Image: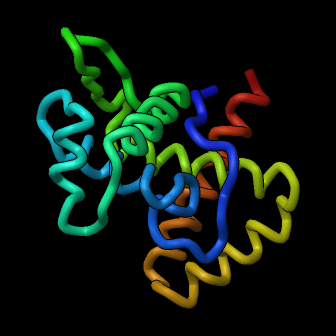
Amino acid sequence: MKKRYFSGYKLGKPGLEKVLGSLESEIMEVAWASDCEVSVRDVLEALKDDRELAYTTVMTIMSRLADKKILEKRKEKNAFLFKPTISRDEFTGQVVGGLIDDLLNDFSEATMSYFVRRVGEKDRSVLEKLEHVISEAKESSDDNEVE
């Protein structure tokens, strides 16, 4: 089972704020956009046009993200440097996967019924692809039972 980097889901919040705080989301976007490690000062500089932040606030949030294993933290001289432990795509994939797994564990039939209805409303061709995937899964399951 894959590591989960979040523990809650906030309905109605935009984007990553569904699983991270507002400032956590902004900091992660800066970290993911960078091709290298980032310092607290780098993040402050990147966010200065959008909000006024104290160095200690950003340091605290980045340390919490490191505690959650989303960022890796290392000390170099008098500063800490951070880098993501997971790509943005991998993180969002794990968020979606974790949410769907939780829904299927607790509300399997309702989750699948709703999902199929919504897919059908959005794009009939995706519904046909889903039928194909279901058919393949059934065949694979039947093959495993025979063995």
Res 25 → quadrant: bottom left
Rendered-image quadrant of the C terminus: top right
What is the count of numbered marks? Answer: 0
Q: Whole-percent x and y of residue 84?
A: 33, 32
Rendered-image quadrant of the N terminus: top right
Q: Foreground residue, 121 or 68?
A: 68
Q: Whole-percent x and y of residue 64?
A: 51, 33
Res 32 → quadrant: top left
Give the residue furthest to the bottom: 121
Does residue 131 sit above or below 19 in this rendering? below
Does residue 39 sit above or below 127 in this rendering? above
Residue pictured at 20% horizontal, 59% vertical: 48
Give the residue furthest to the left: 35
Residue pictured at 31% horizontal, 14% vertical: 74
Judged left or right of residue 137, residue 66 is left
Specify the color scheme. rainbow
Residue pictured at 69% horizontal, 51% vertical: 8
Q: Whole-percent x and y of residue 3?
A: 58, 28
Judged left or right of residue 78, residue 103 is right
Judged left or right of residue 26, residue 120 is right
Does residue 17 sit above or below 2 in this rendering? below
Q: Foreground residue, 30 or 50?
A: 50
Residue pictured at 26% horizontal, 36% vertical: 40
Does residue 68 sit above or below 45 in this rendering? above
Q: Whole-percent x and y of residue 72?
A: 37, 22
Judged left or right of residue 41, residue 115 is right
